[in-house]
Image (tube, helix red, strand yellow):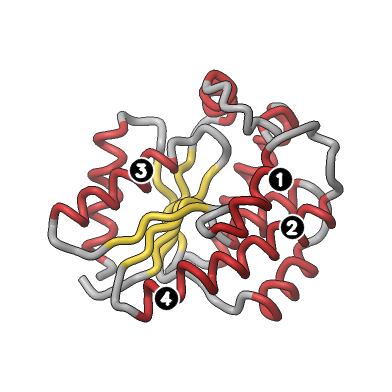
């Protein structure tokens, strides 16, 4: 498989992080040079911004402020981690990228999609080659996410209605970009979900 930029998206607690790690491990076992990273984060500067975004009171920031913080973190991540890895011929697997901002701040946190797209074009200008959206029942995913008690629960604390908006937002995004974004049923076992992802990956190589 040639070097590719692959992202995982989904609502909080959907299992996307587990699947990103699993795919990275599987590809490494196949002899592929893989960089596993995440957003917000993935570089020293972006990890500092991450704490501002995922910790604290749900009303800590407005949607507009979140958008600026996420974009700043993503720019640093792109410069320091993603682009250097791709240029070195490595496959990059990222737990969240710009699609999360399109849904979280662009739709669920306010009517900011046009601003999100403008900032992305100006500051990021890069789309993944392939995106997996892990789709789950929001009530199950929310329970799972809160049960982790990770201390990074700011978005989970916005409640079930917010998670339902996110799910609808990801589905709408998939309909906009069906060739790039693949919706994966996350309600099955992690093993079955992983097998589905590998099957899709091989058909799009």
Asked which secondary structure carries label 3, the reply is helix
Of labels 2 and 4, earlier in sequence is: 2
Q: Are marks 1 and 4 in contact (CB under 8 Å)?
A: no
Say whether marks 2 and 4 touch (CB < 8 Å).
no
Q: Is residue 130 left or right of residue 126?
A: left
Identify the residue shown where x is 37% and y is 75%. Answer: 86
Labelled pair 2, 1 in contact (Cβ < 8 Å): yes
**Which residue is label 3 attached to?**
19
Q: Is residue 68 left or right of residue 201?
A: right
Which residue lies at the image location 63% right of the left edge and 28% below the top edge? Answer: 151
Residue lying farthest to the front in this orientation: 44
Residue nearer the viewer, 185 or 79: 79
Rounded to the nearest angstrom, the CA distance separating label 3 from label 1 is 23 Å
Sequence-first tag of 3 and 1:
3
For label 4, the residue is 84
Quarter occupied by the C terminus: bottom left
- Distance between mark 3 and mark 2 Cα atoms: 26 Å
Q: Which mark is residue 53?
A: 1
Point out the tag, 2 or 1, that comes first from the N-terminus: 1
Query: Residue 77, located in which quarter of the rendered image?
Result: bottom right
**SS class, disc 4:** helix
The residue to which callout 2 is attached is 69
Q: Position of residue 152 (x, y in %)?
A: 63, 33
- Within-10-Å neighbours for mark 3: few <14, some 14–19, many 20+: many
User: In which quarter of the view is residue 76 placed?
Assistant: bottom right
């Amino acid at each position: 498989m040639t070097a590719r930029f692959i992202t995982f998206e989904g609502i909080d607690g959907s299992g996307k992080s587990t699947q990103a790690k699993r795919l990275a491990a599987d590809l490494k076992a196949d002899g592929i040079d893989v960089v596993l990273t995440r957003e917000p984060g993935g570089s020293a500067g972006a990890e500092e911004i991450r704490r501002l975004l995922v910790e604290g009171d749900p009303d800590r920031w407005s949607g507009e402020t979140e958008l600026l913080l996420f974009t700043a973190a993503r720019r640093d991540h792109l410069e320091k981690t993603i682009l250097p890895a791709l240029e070195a011929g490595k496959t990059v697997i990222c737990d969240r990228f710009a699609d999360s901002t399109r849904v979280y701040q662009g739709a669920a946190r306010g009517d900011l999609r046009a601003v999100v797209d403008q900032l992305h074009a100006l500051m990021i200008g890069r789309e993944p080659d392939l995106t997996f959206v892990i789709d789950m029942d929001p009530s199950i995913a929310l329970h799972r996410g809160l049960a982790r008690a990770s201390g990074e629960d700011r978005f989970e604390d916005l409640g079930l209605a917010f998670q339902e908006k996110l799910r609808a937002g990801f589905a709408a995004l998939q309909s906009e970009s069906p060739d790039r974004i693949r919706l994966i049923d996350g309600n099955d076992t992690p093993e079955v979900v992983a097998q589905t992802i590998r099957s899709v990956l091989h058909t799009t190589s």
